[in-house]
Image: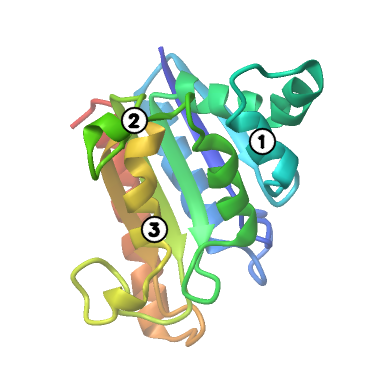
Amino acid sequence: MKTILYISCSARQYHPDQSEHISISRELGEVFLKEFKSGYGQLEVIHRDLSVQPPSFITTDFLAATFSDDVSEEQQKVLAESDALIQEVVDADVIVISSPMYNYGMPAVLKAWFDQVIRIGKTFTFDLARGDKPLEPILSGKQLVLLASWGEFNFKKGDPLYSMNHLTSHIEQLCPYLGAEQFFEIASEYQEFGDERHVQSKAQAFDEAKALARKLAGNE
């Protein structure tokens, strides 16, 4: 059996019976999961909707607890949310993140989630004996899929404006600390233009999401 941790974070929702003001990134997520389920019998999906249940922002108390050698009962309560979110990452074989691009980066709730799950002693170790590279990931063997949507275009890896894409690049950089050894990006572009280019880009993203789901499910 495989486990997918599905992280959605768009402020907009997706409803199949609506055509306006819906989240394209969430729709991509639904397409991917449906295709994966059709090709893989025993599948557990853990859905963490960050816009419905936003993770807490880290605080001074949180930082003190994470670096404490002797965690008190009160500190355990502070870390309880983080512990639960990390366990979902640990249990996952595939992590799927559906996210819009907000101001050229990730939504605040998604950044808050990363801050809760990338934690010393849990997902990475820190040892100055390693010299100038003291951080080392603990988890491994996972795959991470980013299903994204943005209003402009040419932001994909290798495209002329990729340097402005702080969504994809940031998540890819954080992949090792989630145990993700493979990273995949699929994006729908031109949303703000609403023209034929957007229609084609969205259709292509759906096709790519289906193909990737079949591949990761082991059907290709």
Asked whether the residues under the numbered discs 3 and 1 touch, taking CB atoms below 8 Å apart as contact, a structural biologist would say no
Please tell me which residue is depicted at 38% across the width and 47% down the height of the picture: 174
Q: Position of residue 194 (x, y in %)?
A: 49, 84
Q: CA distance from mark 3 to mark 1?
A: 25 Å
Q: Quick one: label 2, few (<14), some, or many (20+) residues within 10 Å?
A: few
Q: CA distance from mark 1 to mark 2?
A: 18 Å
Which residue is more in the foreground, 48 or 57?
57
**Residue designated by label 3:** 170
Q: Earlier in the sequence, mark 3 or mark 1?
A: 1
On residue 220, the disc is none
Which residue is more in the foreground, 206 or 137?
137
Query: In this rendering, does residue 125 appear at all?
Result: yes
| Foreground: disc 3 or disc 2 | 2
Dot 1: what SS? helix
Q: Amino acid at mark 3?
A: His
Q: CA distance from mark 3 to mark 2?
A: 23 Å
Q: Position of residue 30 (x, y in %)?
A: 52, 45
**Residue designated by label 2:** 127
Please tell me which residue is depicted at 40% across the width and 30% down the height of the picture: 124
Q: Earlier in the sequence, mark 3 or mark 2?
A: 2
User: The N terminus appears in which quarter of the rendering?
Assistant: top left
| 97 to the left or right of 71 | left
Which residue is more in the foreground, 111 or 210?
111
**Residue designated by label 1:** 64
Please tell me which residue is depicted at 38% across the width and 56% down the height of the picture: 206
Q: Considering only vertical position in the picture, is 166 above or below 68?
A: below
